[in-house]
Amino acid sequence: MSGDPPVRPGPSAPFGPEGGQVRPDGADGAHGADGADGAHGADGADGSHRGGFGDFGGERGAFIERTFRERIVLAGVTLPPSTDEDTEASLDELTQLVDTAGADVLERVVQRRRAPDPATFVGRGKAEELRDVAVALDSDTVVFDDELTPAQQFNLEKVLGRTAIDRTAVILDIFAQNASSQEGKAQVELALLRYRLPRLRGRRGTLSQQAGGIGTRGPGETQLEVDRRRILRRIHKLEADLREISQHRDVQAKARHRSRAQRVAIVGYTNAGKSTLLNRLTGAGVLVEDRLFATLDATTRRLQLPGGEAVLLTDTVGFVRKLPHQLVEAFTSTLRVAADAHLLVHVVDASSADPDGQIAAVRDVLVEIGAAEVPELLCFNKADRVAPHDADRLVERHPGSVAISATTGAGVEHLLHTVGDRVRSATAPVELLVPFERGDVLAEVHREGEVLSEAATDGGMRLRVRLDEAAAGRLAAWAVDGARPSGG
Ligand SMILES: Nc1nc2c(ncn2[C@@H]2O[C@H](COP(=O)(O)OP(=O)(O)OP(=O)(O)O)[C@@H](O)[C@H]2O)c(=O)[nH]1
Ligand SMILES: [Mg+2]
């Protein structure tokens, strides 16, 4: 089964196996040998684990080996207020993430704690148990369900005698695999580098410390400084590139904002069927796959609603529990379509084990990206995969929601009518009264809104106008009766 050489291969590790250590090709007992004296072996200056994080050479590469299917052990910790079931559900999802990244989960080890151990996240004894499990199963890598600090990661690798990575690394890894556009690639690389920068020290710094003495620290520090400067330069370059792309996007966005069409963004948990829905509604031809994070780039299409009006519909990157903040930061410009939308169609996989947990996770990310205030239409998808009364129950529990199947098309007509209603109610006309001398305001009303009627009165110009929410907010001072557009 593990006839493949257990070394991390070239592409992700241009520097080769760490510390110049060479493993015997295809040696079945290689892991066992590590594990048997794991801690001692790692204490030797050669760093006998491969060090997923410390493996700086792979700064643009993957955390998970893909020339063969890596054998992985998962580690989860139940911290209050979470329950054991929460941990199991989270580990189910981590299993799926690891599978998407191209590796196999062999075993999971869980622990209940009041707080993470600052040094090793799990307790020391648990870490040793993890090492024994990994040795017994001939597993190369332990994946932790929560983000490890650089120090925890280093300490764990020492105890485990093998690579320790966390959920964040797995998600970054999948994003790195799936990025295809220039912007997507730059965003992912930026997230990877920001993640790796504080972890550089793990290997270099400690190696020189282990070698003992101030005298030997010099060269290690120097190399570390060189590495760090190189990464920082690259980070600044990527930030500049992304700013440029984002300015270009702003120009496009302004053009979209000028168009009267309302902006509707499809958001939701990864694999919920967002791209399938965009394709069904607009024939956009976006890639649909039964894997996580298939979509990383935003795609916008014009959609004609049954009521006659057109909206701009955008499909974008999916969310997940504990979405790495490095990704959220790097993807701000992509994620802005949600914050800029008039309406969010929040697609939920009705057939998932925990639709409500997924809804909550998506809403957490929406808050993080400043889209919490955008009106949301919950859309339970994959209704063809659940019993009809289960779909009904979900819709009943979430008033105003709809159930659809993006694949069969069931319920899609109803969804379109609902989108139309929501969009229209958000743009119900308002009455404005603007003094004649405020030509600037009148100009703004004409620029920003759709003027339905206009008449000169004693108090000034009286207008009936359709405004988007932002414009309505800015012009609220001139509204008659304080009428707000969302008031219907
Ligand atoms: N049975 C069923 N499968 C669906 C439905 N909608 C989507 N799927 C499947 O679910 C999987 C994910 O669909 P996508 O449209 O790629 O999902 P997504 O939300 O865009 O996912 P990411 O871009 O990866 O976040 C694919 O295998 C689809 O064929 C549906 O209504 N019913
Ligand atoms: Mg998609």
Image (cartoon, rainbow, N blue to C red):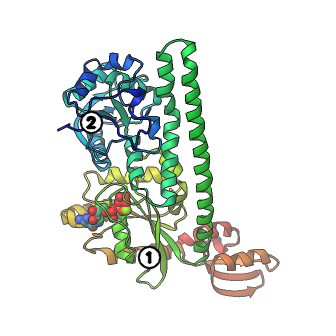
Identify the amino acid type marked 2.
Answer: Pro
Q: What element carries label 2?
A: loop
Relative to residue 394, is residue 469 depicted above or below? below
Q: Viewer-proximal residue, 31 or 310?
A: 31
Residue 256: give x, y in percent of width and height.
57, 73
Residue 5 badge: 2
Do the residues bearing badges 1 and 2 touch, measured as CB atoms within 8 Å?
A: no
Relative to residue 448, is residue 214 depicted above or below? above
Q: Viewer-proximal residue, 111 or 195?
A: 195
Residue 56: give x, y in percent of width and height.
47, 35
Residue 240 badge: none
Circle 1 sits on which residue? 421
Residue 268 in which image quadrant: bottom left
The residue sitting at 31% across, 23% down in the picture is 127
Local crowd size for mark 1, using a 10 Å CA cut-off: few (<14), some (14–19), many (≥20): some
Identify the amino acid type marked 1.
Answer: Asp
Residue 115 in view (yes/no): no
